[in-house]
Image (tube, rainbow, N blue to C red):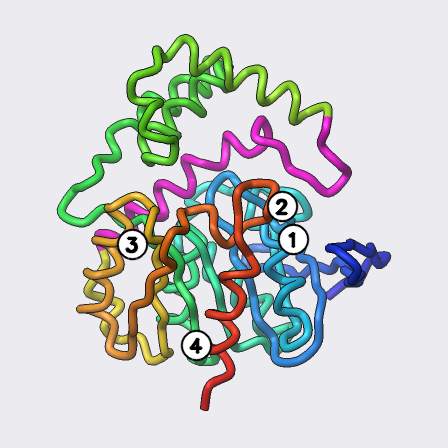
Amino acid sequence: MSDATTNPRTTGPTTTTVTTGSVTSADGTTIGYRRLGRGPGLVLLHGAMESSVSHIELAQALASDFTCYLPDRRGRGLSGPHREGHGLRTEVADVAALLEETGARLLFGVSSGGVVALRTARSVPAVTRAVVFDPPLPIDGSPSLAWLARHERELAEGRTAAALVTGMKGTQMGPKVFDYVPRRLLEALTTKLMAREDGDAGPDDVPFRALAPTLRHDVRLVAEQSRELEDLRATRAEILLLVGGRSPAYMRVAADALAKVLPHAERAELPGLGHSASGNAARRGAPERVAPVLRRFFTRA
């Protein structure tokens, strides 16, 4: 493990020191992470179109009780690239390397990061508890993943804004009004958003333009796990399936399906909150509401 210079971040009147480090995964890829807090180790796994800094405010809210580790999943920020044959086994190996190095035993994952948390809890006996927020698994083929081919074609053509619009529509992440807005207008708005974000991005930020090529990998992870749902029956860790009351309906369906498969699972809902709830406030997150739920689950006897 390597450590880098500390980097203070401030939320309100409190300053939390963040350090960076890295581990080497089984295939030799560097997995970088951010670390803050004190107490039992808790790994926070971001979802698609996110990076380690996307949940820094949630980590700050938990830092008085946990040592929080926020890895950049492959293809982002501090970590190395995706390689040929990338899949859930690769993602689990990345997390396992971090768990082994740090001694952390607790996991939180959102969306595709939640799928990785689930598979890690199934595969790594050291994991004792995990919270999975808004699992995006398609149950009985719904929602369809047919949009992925178009997304990949648009990326290959260099049409990043178009690819992002396709991904947003396919994952049902946009507001419902977007269903009635012409694609050409959505693509123009996305282009302006990316340009503004590129100009505003700080040294630690990973903008949408850089994240766009990672989405296809996350979708494939989700598809892989949906085909292997029954394998999760062997999970020994305690799992909290957490869903947003305003998140896409298929994520609540997925949580219900997982609750029937996982032997030590419970389900809870965050009323009035959507898929972005665990993220930073600037991205419509509400970490101050999510943190107490995690704290209760991870600290109870």
**Closer to the camera: disc 3 or disc 2?**
3
Q: Which residue is mark 1?
A: 30
- Rendered location of residue 293, percent (x, y): 46, 70
Residue 74 percent coordinates (x, y): 55, 47
Q: Nearer the viewer, mark 1 or mark 4?
A: 4
Q: Which residue is mark 4?
A: 129
Q: Is residue 63 magenta?
A: no
Amino acid at the residue labelled 3 = Gln
- Is label 3 in a helix, a strand or a loop? helix
User: Among all residues in the image, which is located at the extreme left?
Assistant: 140
Q: Are marks 4 and 2 in contact (CB under 8 Å)?
A: no
| Residue 17, above or below 173 | below
Q: Amino acid at mark 4?
A: Arg
Quick one: label 3 or label 2, which is nearer the N terminus? Answer: 2
Residue in the picture at 41% in, 35% down? 216
Q: CA distance from mark 3 to mark 1?
A: 24 Å
Q: Main secondary structure of the magenta part?
A: helix
Give the side of residue 228 with respect to residue 271, left or right.
left
From the top left corner, tell me how far across and down residue 172 is, in percent.
32, 34
**Relative to the observer, which residue lies in front, 128 or 26?**
128
Q: Earlier in the sequence, mark 3 or mark 4?
A: 4
Residue matched to label 3? 225
Instruction: Give the magenta range.
Output: 200-227
- Dot 1: element: strand
- The label shown at residue 80 is 2
Circle 2 SS class: loop
